[in-house]
Amino acid sequence: MNLLPNNGAKLVYVLVLIGLFTGGLMLAQWAPWSEDQQSSNGYANLGGNFTLNSQQGEVALTDFKGQLVLMYFGFTSCPDVCPTALSSITSSMHELGPELEQKIQPLFVSVDPARDTLENLAAYSAYFHPRMLGLTGSLEHLDNLVQQYGAYYRHIPLENSALGYTVDHTSRIYVIDTQGKLITTLAHGTSVDDIVKLLKQHM
């Protein structure tokens, strides 16, 4: 009957699925530092200025001095994680009201420059907020930037898919203060109320 090999194969398959699911949940909230490091200047060696491309031309972090910056790494073909995070940014800005909203600059950094053209990025970002800027650069430049901010991304081939590949990436909102210093990151799923409270503390 060969029941044992079949059952064994099914068990392995189920364990692999559980592992992938658990790994995905962990990645969405992944950060390269511990809570202890975070509470004792864990961000001191992360962050800093950068320059990326937008539909309007080159954009540098220093262009937004005097504003809080909310930065998110992702890609426009992302089915749900990116839209959820960007919607949280937008909702948080709206909750602050028009006056305070103008003091925040949202940035969406694509780690999929081969498919995300500057025109597509501009349209995609504006869908979430009219002032959100869609930015990207070469893969080499992006590799340096995600390392600079303690983030992560990886292109994963997809068999039998028109997309060809997907992108595994950190899903955190990077909060940068008015002087361009990374002050904290917000895990995927952080409530709008908690985001608003944090933003008010630094405005």
Image: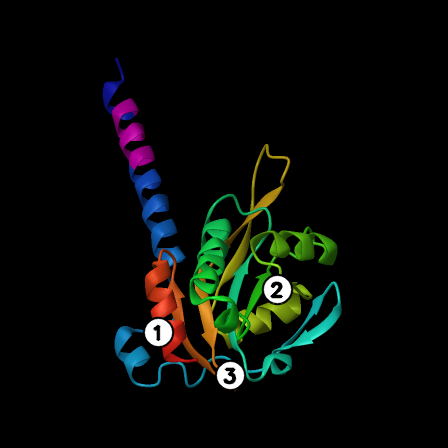
Along the viewing direction, whichever of 99 and 83 lies nearer the viewer:
99
The secondary structure making up most of the magenta span is helix
Which picture quadrant has residue 38?
bottom left
**Residue 101: % across, % down:** 51, 69
| Residue 135 in the image, given as x and y percentages of width and height | 65, 64
Residue in the picture at 35% in, 74% down: 33
Which structural element holds mark 2?
loop
Rendered residue at 71%/68% (across/down): 53
- Asked if residue 202 lies in the magenta stretch, the reply is no
The N terminus: image quadrant: top left
Which mark, residue 131?
2
* Mark 2 or 1: the one toward you: 2
Distance between mark 1 and mark 3 Cα atoms: 23 Å
**Number of marks in the rendered image:** 3
User: SS of the residue at dot 3?
Assistant: loop
Q: The residue tagged with tag 1: helix, strand or loop?
A: loop
Q: Quadrant of residue 106?
A: bottom right
Tell me which label, 2 or 3, sits earlier in the chain: 2
In the image, what residue occupies the spot 52% across and 87% down? 179
Residue placed under numbered mark 1 in the picture: 33
Whether 11 is drawn above or below 105: the answer is: above
User: Which of pointers 2 and 1 lies earlier in the amino acid sequence?
Assistant: 1
What segment is highlighted magenta in the picture? 6-14
Distance from the alpha carbon under mark 2 to that under mark 3: 17 Å
Residue 37 in view: yes
Query: Any magenta on residue 12?
Result: yes
Foreground label between 1 and 3: 3
Q: What number is the disc on residue 178? A: 3
